[in-house]
Image (spheres, rainbow, N blue to C red):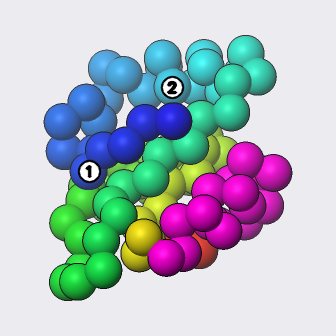
């Protein structure tokens, strides 16, 4: 699990590493933000790249985190 806003560590050079992890069977999950107020700020472009690799990334409230994390671990679609 990588907790990030994708602004740092979300560069193009790391994309092959993320794809290799996924291809090796690692369950990569990226919670973007856990907060109850305001909309979180994150790099949408990198989040879209992760989605294209089949890597879920989502922002959510603290209350919805356990349910969304369980869904991501089980390979279900996640909507945060």
Circle 1: is it few (<14), some (14-19), or many (20+) Cα within 10 Å?
many
Q: Nearer the viewer, residue 62 or 43?
A: 62
The residue under the point 48% across, 17% down is 17
Is the residue 76 above or below the residue 50 in the image?
A: below
Asked whether residue 52 is in view, the answer is no
Instruction: Examine the image and state in which quarter residue 64 appears.
Output: bottom right
Q: Nearer the viewer, residue 58 or 23?
A: 58
Is the residue 26 above or below the residue 48 in the image?
A: above
Query: Quick check: marks 2 and 1 in contact, CB under 8 Å?
Result: no
* Numbered badge on residue 76: none
- Residue 72 in picture, x, y percent from top left: 68, 54
Instruction: Examine the image and state in which quarter residue 3 appears.
Output: top left
Between the residue at mark 2 and the residue at mark 1, the CA separation in whole angstroms equals: 16 Å
* SS for dot 2: helix
Magenta includes 69? yes
The residue under the point 58% across, 25% down is 19
The residue under the point 69% across, 24% down is 26
* SS for dot 1: loop
Q: Is residue 32 left or right of residue 28?
A: left
- Residue marked by disc 2: 18
- Residue 13 in picture, x, y percent from top left: 31, 20
- Residue marked by disc 1: 5
Circle 2: is it few (<14), some (14-19), or many (20+) Cα within 10 Å?
some
The segment highlighted magenta reads 63-78
Asked whether residue 51 is in view, the answer is yes
Q: Is residue 55 left or right of residue 25?
A: left
Q: Please tell me which of labels 2 and 1 falls first in the chain.
A: 1
- Residue 62 in picture, x, y percent from top left: 42, 70
Disc number lying in front (2 or 1): 1
- Residue 12 in picture, x, y percent from top left: 31, 29
The residue under the point 51% across, 36% down is 1
């Amino acid at each position: 699990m990588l907790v990030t806003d994708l602004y740092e560590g979300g560069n193009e050079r790391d994309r092959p590493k993320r794809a290799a992890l996924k291809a090796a069977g690692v369950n990569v999950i990226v919670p973007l933000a856990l907060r109850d107020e305001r909309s979180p700020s994150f790099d949408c472009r990198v989040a879209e790249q992760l989605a294209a690799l089949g890597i879920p990334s989502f922002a959510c409230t603290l209350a919805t985190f356990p349910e969304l994390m369980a869904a991501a671990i089980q390979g279900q679609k996640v909507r945060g």
